[in-house]
Image (cartoon, grey):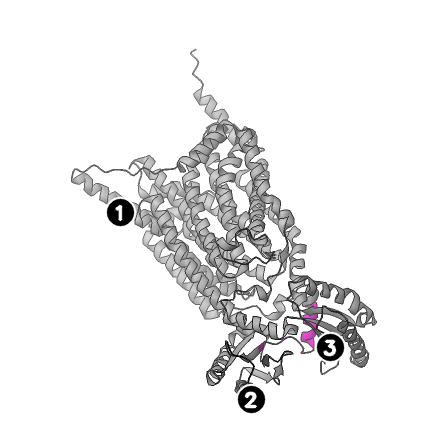
Amino acid sequence: MTNLPVRMARWSAGHPWRAIAAWFLFVALCLGIGIGVGGNPAVSADYRLGEAGWAEAMAAEGGLQQKPMERVLISAAHGTGRLDQAAVGEAARDITERMRGLAEVESVAAPVRSAGGTAVRVDVTMRGPELDGKEHVEPLLAQTAQVQAAHPGLRVAETGGPSIGKGVGELRDSDLARTEMIALPVTLITLLLIFGSIALAVVPLLLALSSIVAAVGLSMLASHAFPDAGVGTNVILLIGLAVGVDYTLFYLKREREERARSAGRLSSRALVELAAATSGRAVVLSGLAVAVSSATLYLAGDVIFSSIATGAILVSLVAVLSSLTVLPALLVKLGERAEHRAARKAARGVAARTRRQSTGGGRITTTLLRTTSRRPAITLGVATLVMLALAAPLLGLDLTDMGRETHPRDIPAMRTYDRLNEAFPELKAMHQVVVRAAPDRAGEVTGALRDLAERAKADPRLAGTAELRTSPDGRISILELAVPHHVSTDAARSSLRDLRGDHVAATVGGLDGVETAVTGDVARYADYPEHQKGKLPLIIGALLLVTFAMTVWAFRSVVLGLVGVVLNLLSAGASLGLLVLVFQNGWAEGLLDFTSTGSIGSRVPLFLFVILFGLSMDYQVFVISRIREAALNGVPTRQAVLDGIGGSAGVVTGAAFVMVTVFASFVSLHIMEMKQMGFALAVAVLLDAVIIRIMILPSLMLLLGDRSWWPSRGVRRAAAAAGESRRPAQVG
């Protein structure tokens, strides 16, 4: 592991132009091949989880699976009174004829008038799978707009899964473009402050962006093994900018330190090799840690988390590759330019000034570290109590899937969705009871489902309307029950529990040799968080094991492996606790511009744990590598800890600021889960960089002393050798 970065850096430094050309050729090939092959998007079957997923699979066998549907709502124009029935009828006929003429439309239902007579809706069923609807809904929206223009006295608008999905995608893309406009300049300014050089500030950003481009291309190839759920590129952008800058920053900072220390006595190639032997190894370990930690998400058995894992693995490994290959070449060329400038100044008799590289973390860091060194036990106790206090709200965590009603109202289809639900409350949600039986039992199944529909009419939580459908071969039957409540409400969820536990069991569920399962909007909403809760212990267990094993492998220390696990749990717990306070309890609704759902997105904790554990290894590997390097050189452990923490504080602070900026920019997004993820990661990185790495980690290592390295004997041998060399020679 130590020799590989040095060998790669040596070749790159010796052939800089070849290395630079090869890197950008690699990036171009990755993107070109990815575009040529194309991505493989996830299909409906990839999302099926729990009982709801089983029911959907049975429905698909009979050709009764859900299809993309749009609803055109016709109501009175703004500020007008009662509906003009003749005008409404004409508009309904107009939209029906237009929609039937579209190749994307399978069927158009007869107009339906609301109970209060305030609106009319026209249901339009699209062709193709449910998930593909948003890709083909534009012609339908165009026809609706034309009908609106032709009937200015009415309000004609369209909503449905496809148009809402399209609106969410467009809003997300717009938000991400805005966050990039914020994150990139802030990152560049931060790097400029760290290095005081435009060239050195641009290098980390350039390599991070090129790594992102290469990873996007590779992700298209990987999607043929792990289908893309549409989040892979977002994860690559989120993680790629953070780790890409960090890895380059660690490497580049060390090269600058060695250059300042050598005072011109070493060539640029020699300095690059020195940096590769130290920070290069730390970068490789950090990248592997992010990749291996992210791989635990495959255990979730969920296409969304598989996409997240694939994106994080690819971009972290590509970022490592860039820091080991093209970065040494760039540093050599920049170093040679600096040497030439210094030589020209010397020839003119101008004294060359060497820029001293600050390794400290500023006054605050110095003060915290001084307090830690003087009173490690008190610092450890206070800092740990603070982290536990921040984690306490986690005990009240409520995980839910973010239903459609949580989408921002900036999307026009969502505003129409609200008006549709007000006029037709029975459309808010739906239960689907799916039955599979032998064809000769179709009559028996139909009778039992009709009994179930009668029982449902007496349930005040249901709308009382039911629709029964049977597949052409008679094997699959579906009973659809309208639910006049949003999927997140207690009424909707309790109606699902009673439907599964009582109504189905008392009717069709009592038939021998018949398979029955319940799906629908409410079931999907309820089953997904339960699936995540069931997988959470397995993934966290695997994550703890991976973190422990990676740390032990990197530093040959069981003690540090245990320390790493505990510290990562502390930072993850504290950030999740703050997430509960801010988003679930609504402490910062006005400040962060959101409306609390009273819950946390079911994907957020799993995403946070895995990504944070990987990213925390960045700081842990870098900091402990500096400490271990000093200890192996014979410096006593106490002094090695103080020197290592103090010497790495500046670069850790800079790297953390970059990460916090990138993650915090996601808080401005409109999509609730992405807002929660960005906040949690930003807070976690901030807590990790300040409290964990400057207070708790050094306190622990100061208290443990040489026991920190158990069972490795390398540090003890180095200390003994240093003591032997310092012992005065005996005169014979």
Q: Real-space Cα distance between discs 2 and 3?
A: 42 Å
Other-residue count near label 1 (Cα within 10 Å), few / some / many at <14 / 14–19 / ≥20:
few
Q: Is residue 618 left or right of residue 384?
A: left
Residue 533 image position (x, y, % from top left): 66, 55
**Visible residue check, residue 332:** yes
Provide residue 611's location: percent of width, then percent of height. Answer: 54, 51
Residue most extreme to the front: 81
The amino acid type found where label 3 is placed reads Ile
Magenta stretch: give its range. Answer: 54-70
State the SS at label 2: helix
| Residue 722 versus residue 322 in the image, above or below | above
The residue carrying mark 3 is 476
* Residue 560 visible (yes or no): no
Q: Considering only order in the chain, which callout, 1 or 3, is on the residue closer to the N terminus?
A: 1
The quadrant of the image that shows the C terminus is top left
Question: Nearer the viewer's eye, disc 2 or disc 3?
Answer: 2
Real-space Cα distance between discs 1 and 2?
80 Å
Q: CA gap, disc 3 to disc 1?
A: 74 Å
Residue that mark 1 sits on = 337
The location of residue 376, given as percent across then percent down, is 53, 29
Residue at (43, 48) in percent of width and height: 246
In the figure, is residue 208 to the left or right of 395?
Answer: left
> What is the three-letter code of the residue carrying label 2?
Ala
Question: Label 2: which residue?
Answer: 86
Count residues near mark 2 (Cα–Cα under 10 Å), then give few for <14, some for 14-19, many for 20+: few
